[in-house]
Image (spheres, coloured by chain):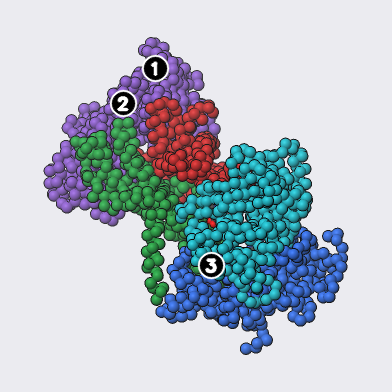
Amino acid sequence: IERGGTLTYGRYADSLFLDPVLNDANVDIWILSNLYDTLLLPTDDGKDVKPGLASEYKMADDGMSIALTLRDGIKFSDGSPITASDVVWSLKRATKKDNGIWGFMVDSIDDIVADGDTKVTIKLKHPDPAILAALTVFNTAIMPQKAFEAAKGTTDEEKAKDFGTHPVGSGAFMLKSWDRGSVMKLVKNPYYWAKGEDGQPLPYLDEVDFPVIPDDATRILKLGSGELDGAEFIPYSRVAELKGSAAVDMELFPSTRVQYVTMNVRPEIDGKKNPLSDVKVRQAMNYAINKQAIIQIVTHGVGTPQTSYMSTATPLHAGDQPLYPYDLEKAKSLMKESGYPDGFSTSILVLAGNQDQISISTALQQMLGQIGVKLDLQQVDNATLTQQYREGKFVMRNAAWTDDIADPNEITSYFAYSPNIDALHTGWNSEEADTLFEASQKEMDGAKRAEEYARIQEIFNTTGPTLPLYETPYPVALSKKVHGFLQIPLGNNIFSGAWKDK
Amino acid sequence: MNTNVPLLSIDGLSKEFSGPFSLSRRLKGLPPISVKALNHVTLDVKRGETLGIVGESGCGKSTLARCMVRLYEPDGGAVRFEGKDISTLKGPERRAFNRRVQMIFQDPYGSLNPRMTVAQILGEALSVHRMRPKTEIPARIAELIELVRLPEDAAHRRPHEFSGGQRQRIGIARALAVEPEVIVADELVSALDVSVQAQVVNLLLQLQEKLKLTVVFVAHDLRLVRHISHRVAVMYLGQVMEIATAEALFTAPRHPYSKALLDAAPDLDPENRSRAVAATGEIPSPMNVPPGCPFASRCPYVFDRCRTERPLLTPRGTGQYAACHLTDFGAAEPPVPASTET
Amino acid sequence: MTTAAEQSGLLVRGLTTTFDTARGTAIAAADIDLDVAPGEVVGLVGESGSGKSVTLRSIMRLVREPGKVRGRVEWNGRDLIGMPAEDLRRLRGSEIAMIFQEPMTALNPVLPVGLQIDENLKAHTDLGRKARQARAIELMTIVGIPSPETRLKEYPHQFSGGMRQRAMIAIALACSPKLLLADEPTTALDVTIQDQILKLLLDLRDRLQMSVVLVTHDLGVVAQTCDRMAVMYAGRIVETGTVPEVFATPHHPYTRGLLGSVPNADAPRTLLRSIDGTPPNLTDLPAGCAFHPRCAFATDLCRRERPPLETFGPGRAAACFHHQQVARAEALV
Amino acid sequence: MHLLSFILRRLLQMIPTIIFIFVVTFVLVRLLPGDPASAMIGDRALDADVTRINHQLGLDKPLPVQFLYYVERIVTGDLGDSIALKLPVTTLIAQRLPVTLLMTAMAAVIALVLAVPLAFVAALRRDSIADNAIRGAFQVGLSMPVFYVGIILLTVFAAQFKIFPVGGYGETVTEHLYHLFLPSLTLALSLSAILMRNLRASVIAVMNAEYVDFAAAKGLRSTVILYRHILRNALISTVTLFGLQIGTMLGGAVVTETVFAVPGAGRLLIDSIFGRDYPVLQGLTITLAVLVSITFLLTDIFQAWLDPRVAR
Amino acid sequence: MTLQDTKPAATRRLALSRLPKQPLSLVFGGLLLLASVVLAVVPQLFAPYDPNAFDYNALLAPPSAAHLFGTDSFGRDVLSRVIHAYTIDMQIAIFATIFPFVFGTLVGAFVGYYGGLTEAIFGRVVDAVITFPFLVLVIAIVSVLGPGLGNMYVAVSIVGWVFYARLVAAEVKVQKRLDYADAGRVMGYTAMRIIFRHLLPNAITPAIVYWMTDMALAILLGSSLGYLGLGAQPPISEWGVQIADGKNFMNTAWWISVFPGVAIVLTGLGFSLAGDGVAELLRVKR
Ligand SMILES: Nc1ncnc2c1ncn2[C@@H]1O[C@H](COP(=O)(O)OP(=O)(O)OP(=O)(O)O)[C@@H](O)[C@H]1O
Ligand SMILES: Nc1ncnc2c1ncn2[C@@H]1O[C@H](COP(=O)(O)OP(=O)(O)OP(=O)(O)O)[C@@H](O)[C@H]1O
Ligand SMILES: [Mg+2]
Ligand SMILES: [Mg+2]
Ligand code: NI
């Protein structure tokens, strides 16, 4: 292990807003944990929790409260101590209804009370099997109440805006400078609590720079020329090539990312009859898709077929067989049995300029053509896509999902639990799945909860409104000099343990 | 029809062109720059005659000619054709006027549409004015080509295949196609070579004889104007300085400017040389015409009244008119130049 | 052909200029012989396209690609055609000056008039800034431009036509040339201004003892200003002589036609004696005498053979087999 | 004096143009399907979140009200805050625009350095092998899509030979220049092709002008003729074209900026379209329009200086 | 009688004598364009494969005898796709420019002829359009109307006509000052006849020449939009889309993007040479 140095990590897009509660996008989320620390931390495999700012945590036996003890002598990056009142304030802010879209993860929290300077008790409305995982999520990060309230502005939002330009947290790094759209620079937080392998405080690195390089090819070129030490979102087409490169470590970090197609299953869309509402049609389409071919074409072999709607890295994932193995005959016979034996025309929304989605859809177009389904591609921008999606006016769309929490409840509430967003806004529902989900949300018995999830997955995987395609790891290319960098399955980039050869 | 009424009469005609109205002028409260191209011009054209109009560049000859065929709408005064103000003509009446009064242009290159053949040019004129039934048009075109003595195969050629003189003939043929009574010829031969000039002038003279045309002949070549005109008007800075029969004007000009113009024209006789300059100074800019006599700044006979009061066109006996305060200038013996300080 | 011209003045022998064009080779000037003695004004007349400008440009070696110039041009015994470019540059604008027909296009529109005079002085004299300025003002005064100090700072478009032509003359005269080649210097001007400019040129000739070649197509101008004249047709000189002699008895039918085309004072509204037909195409000259298709005197000989420029009197020459007949016919009229 | 009134008049003429652009932008962006909230929070947004955000942004008010509200702010010089980046638009523009300006300026210089000498060579040796080679090469440059040229330049000069950095912007001024060289070159290629073509034609036209002959007849040295008489006149028409192209380039730098990872205004503009970041889009379009108008104005002034006939 | 006889003979002679003297650029440009048009009309005669057929056994195959230009990531034959793209790209060239050309020319003719207030208003429109960032406008319009070529044509047309109008207006203004226009007025011809029969034929040349360049530009724009995903939609093959497809394979499978690039350059060259040639051909002989 060597200490010091600057690691330059090329990102495809810049962050937008560095507030753990009010932010909206992965570009923020995935680096927030370097700036802000949480009470608990996800384990490296993303499936469990370990102590963070809280050195001890204990769930009450009735599941109605959690007792936490803060580490001794921990400080924010401005040197001020982290107290229990900061924790209370931060968590209350995270649970407030109007603050951001992440509140649902800590919905079960009833109250937070401080007990002295280092003890905190979180009281719950009901037992919540996912609450510990929720305490590792960015929105429960602990922020300095004083510094935040000293920021300019009157409302929370205005203060957050100002605070976000010079944030103070307790993560391994702190913001040094931020040139919007160009480069963000982090420096070592001298007050960070965790210790490295050498017994000295982490992080090893003095500085991490995040230049923004939207073009994939350019990012790789820069890595090759030594201008970057690491580059995220390597296109799959380049993975094999970079794996063979002597100067580069091509890392494929396990992820919770799944790639699928969402189908609107309402009986009618815009007053027109919708063939996709026929479950046979959906199954036929699923069988008609050659996932292996798509994995070859789009991910160049990097991906693996989905075995459930949630990724294998998600806790309580169930299923060991690829869903809907390619079977054209079966697909054809299912079509015959369906209400549309002669096929039909339909369309799919593609995010404009997204090569993966274009490739997938082009392949789907060809594959579905074989069972008489004529597919039109419609490239639209993100805002249009989202709006049509939210309004339930789309027919089919490409989509991908990554978990934010080490628990199956997030993905399931969006995918299978219809009261949330109508099952991906598709209009699909299953009373059984809904009931099971509601039960699982309070089920503290791990085994039982696993059973409930197994059943939900079975229902969704056989009749659900999606065409599951593949799951992929996070492709990150690193210079051979870089060690110890980690991207956890939830996507968070962890630089605290990274170091660089001199 | 009253034969005493002149065929075409121009009555106190004025025409101004306004130039760009720049911001600096607006800020200074000045009016836009304007060119007084014609300033109260009064003239008559009698049936069957040739009226020559001479003057130096920019004096308003073309503007006058264009007003006569209603290419320009005058700002003041009127042009009357057979007693009728032409600016009041509308629809068919206007078309009829356009047919009866034709114009021929100076520029042999610009006055013909380069993308039309001679037959198309003539045919268009014939058909628009319905001069002949459709079937007879080709024959009439051939006739016109013959009339202006163009080569027989001219009909299907385009203007660029002709020489300057031939092009002017095409222009004449186009005007004649509609069988007009009056032809206004603006610098018809100025752009042509001497040897070709003579051909076109001869043609014009012959046609006039044959078709009983009335001709307004605008030119700056004094010799030529004298040769073909019955009467001549001399213009200077938008005003008529003198009108007289050709003979009278060239033998006894009654205006100092007419005289200067005649003296300046190089004599063809090498024995008759003079080293004296006929008129000093430059023509004033038409953008600010002096208030009095426009020629005052260059006139050797100038006196105070000339600078303040504009002389009117007054008779000088036997159909001769001049606009000069020295009413007996050129009558018997010329007056002594007043002073030379200007 | 006078021996005097051998040493001083301009001597042109067999000057031929051709242009290779897509339609064939145009012989724009063919076998031109021309002498100009010191202080003499020679008029060069002819129709448009007869090669007058090309002749002047050839003398100055200003013919551009694809033009080719052959022959001999001597100025005070020095060969202009063969001399090195740098030597020629020194002569141009100083000893030999040229005036163009269109002052609007010949003056650079984006440079002040003063600068355009100044650069001439700078190229050929070693006068200082002040001295050049003074000389420029002097020149402007000579050519009759009022308030020269302010006028020098103005641009050509701020000048009237006459003023521009004067400015061009001022530029040409900057280094007191000994030979002035004037290409239609007054064609674009009004008669009263033309009168002024021509008389100015004559005055300057007297003052500086310049030789002048004056190109024009106006016979009146020749009659009033020139000592001798040469008539060009289709690239060739067809007649030369002193001005009074040529006007009195033209020996070439073309000269005769030209004189007849101009209306003269006595017979108004009669037909003019025009020359029929049009000038020939230079790439496609008729065989024999180039004028024969338009000539009333033409015989088979004329159609077969080209008449040489034949001297028939002191300083008189004509290129016509029938020139005596033509002269007699003229006398009859 | 004349110049001043000329400038004043041009500035006055700009006002309706800017208003027009302002209104069009305002209406157009609001016609775009999708709203800022959709663009920002994407798939996971709940309807309640969207309503809340749109309310916070005042987007639930009727359009005319929004318009008046925006006009009111703009008159006070306030362009509002970015929806996505939560920064004042003026700050963003101040950060991003200089990059694009620098890149455009460099492209202009490179284009001139390429086009002017080669145009002269081509014009002076008209129809020679050199002329045809130069014209052919530029023609190929002109026929290639910008993103393609960019990728090729990147692959060759940055990846293969490592002469230039692979995009980015750098920190010091020298670094800026160094980093922006390839993107500027990319932009310059098509610009120089257009300039070369035009300049060559006008040099040929000017060389045929009589005043060039007259200059030669004055016995001037050929260098004087070339620089004083030919170059200046030939530039007159090229200058107008140049100004027009620079104006277009300012708004068209998007693609280059993406390929080369240049954090400039072009990318901000595209991001703001796709992000439905109304305040940024409006503020930037208007700023660009003003800049472009100023470019045109400068062009006109320069042209008036070159050609005294213009300023009346 | 003589008239009837001379006409065909004269025209035939002219046509024959003109033929070898065609400007060289027109010959080359014309040939390139002719080839492009043929490929655009009957691509199936030249394309060895179905442009949309996948071949999982030949993904990213380099150029070989079987696939002269190699295959792309779907195993589609690049040559066949390049050839089939002619159809769509030539269509872009025409459809994106035809309305601007026609409408712009008409507006230009009226503005140039009548001047005055129309000209002042038009001047402001021109200002606004040329100051507006063009790409932004196109992207915004395409986003409003939805992606696809049809809407791209609409977007380009909304802006494009202005340039034609400007060119034609300027030229008409020059032409209407020439005497032949006045001659028409003196003959008593209507304004419409003067504008369309006399002025326009003489004023349209710059617009036609610009049209040629504009078609090349339209292909480039179409490609750029295709590259951004806003132009032609898969599986239609279009050069810009192909280049975008091949962008990630620049290092490993250069052929995917290089050959469509060559096609764009060649077509652009064809248009631009033809433009020069047409300018030469239509030059008014005086
Ligand atoms: N359309 C116009 N717009 C502005 N000014 C004009 C226009 N037509 C003529 N003028 C001006 O009006 C004056 C008279 O012009 P006009 O053409 O009538 O003169 P002219 O005697 O025919 O001259 P020339 O002998 O040069 O043909 C000139 O000063 C000219 O500049
Ligand atoms: N650069 C050139 N290329 C081809 N032919 C040329 C060129 N320059 C001149 N000519 C030809 O040379 C001939 C003589 O032209 P020149 O200019 O000397 O005539 P000009 O007598 O001066 O006529 P004008 O009175 O019209 O000035 C013309 O027929 C012309 O076509
Ligand atoms: Mg006139
Ligand atoms: Mg000449
Ligand atoms: Ni002033």
The outermost residue toward the bottom is B1
Identify the residue at horizontal 57%, vertical 62% (top origin): C320
Q: Is residue B210 above or below residue C71?
A: below
Q: Helix or strand or loop: what does disc 2 sit on? A: helix
Q: Chain of mark 3?
A: C
Q: Is mark 2 within 8 Å of ligand 2?
A: no
* Chain C pictured colour: cyan
Residue D305 in the image, given as x and y percentages of width and height: 63, 45
Q: Is residue B156 above or below residue E97?
A: below
* Chain E pictured colour: green
Q: Are marks 1 and 2 in contact (CB under 8 Å)?
A: no
Q: Chain of mark 1?
A: A
* Chain B pictured colour: blue
* Chain D pictured colour: red
Residue highlighted by disc 2:
A242
Q: How far is the residue under mark 3 from the one under mark 2?
A: 93 Å
Q: Are marks 3 and 2 on the same chain?
A: no
Of residue E270 and residue A115, the one placed in the foreground of this image is E270
Q: Ligand 1 sits in which quadrant? A: bottom right
Q: Are marks 3 and 2 in contact (CB under 8 Å)?
A: no
Residue highlighted by disc 1:
A500
